């Protein structure tokens, strides 16, 4: 499990191959799903869970001003032995905005 932090107004792209089996749970703030066709999907609030597999979601957005947090769980265990090369984690380490 890892945590995705989105500052107010931030957007993070969802690349299907990297998020294939990901399940997210909003633990703080609000997160809006951006769909494949560019349309904005539902705004999810604290305690809302969502799958990314097969949903057509192309990005996660924070529509609010306050920081949002999402716990991301994947069924395949990953061992982290050093600095992560996961693009979203690198993005977060670099300030968390796009």
Image (cartoon, rainbow, N blue to C red):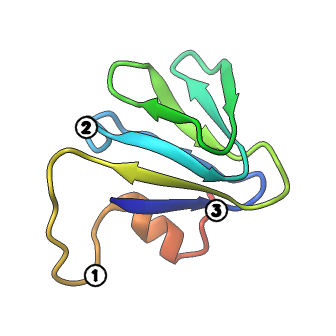
**Where residue 27 sits in the image (x, y, percent)?**
59, 53
- SS label for mark 3: loop
Q: Residue at x 43, y 59 (%)?
A: 88
Which is nearer the N-term, disc 3 or disc 2? 2
Q: Badge 1 local density, few (<14 within 10 Å), some, or many (20+)?
A: few
- Residue with the most extreme front position: 47
CA distance for labels 2 and 1: 21 Å
Considering depth in this image, is 7 or 37 the residue closer to the camera? 7
Split into 4 quadrants, where in the image is the N terminus?
A: bottom left
In the rendered image, the vertical position of residue 51 relative to residue 85, given as above or below = above
The correct choice, above or below, for 16 with respect to 66 in the image is above
Residue 62's tag is none
Q: Secondary structure at mark 1?
A: loop
For label 3, count other residues whose C-alpha is less than 10 Å away and answer few (under 14), some (14-19) or many (20+). Answer: some
Instruction: Identify which residue, 33 or 39, lies in the foreground.
Output: 33
Residue marked by disc 1: 83
In the image, which disc is placed on residue 17? 2
Quadrant position of residue 23 = top left
For marks 2 and 1, the one nearer the N-term is 2
Tell me how far mark 3 sits from mark 2, CA to CA.
21 Å
Find disc 3 in the rendering and name its residue.
Answer: 97
Q: Can you name the residue that lies furthest to the bottom here?
A: 82
């Amino acid at each position: 499990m890892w945590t995705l932090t989105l500052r107010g107004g931030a957007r993070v792209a969802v690349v299907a191959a990297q998020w294939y089996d990901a399940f997210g749970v909003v633990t703080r703030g609000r997160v809006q799903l951006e769909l494949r066709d560019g349309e904005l999907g539902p705004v999810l609030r604290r305690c809302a869970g969502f799958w990314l597999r097969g949903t057509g979601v192309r990005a996660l957005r924070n529509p609010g001003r306050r920081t949002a947090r999402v716990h991301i769980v994947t069924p395949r265990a990953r061992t982290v032995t050093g600095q992560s090369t996961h693009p979203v984690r690198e993005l977060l380490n670099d300030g968390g905005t796009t």
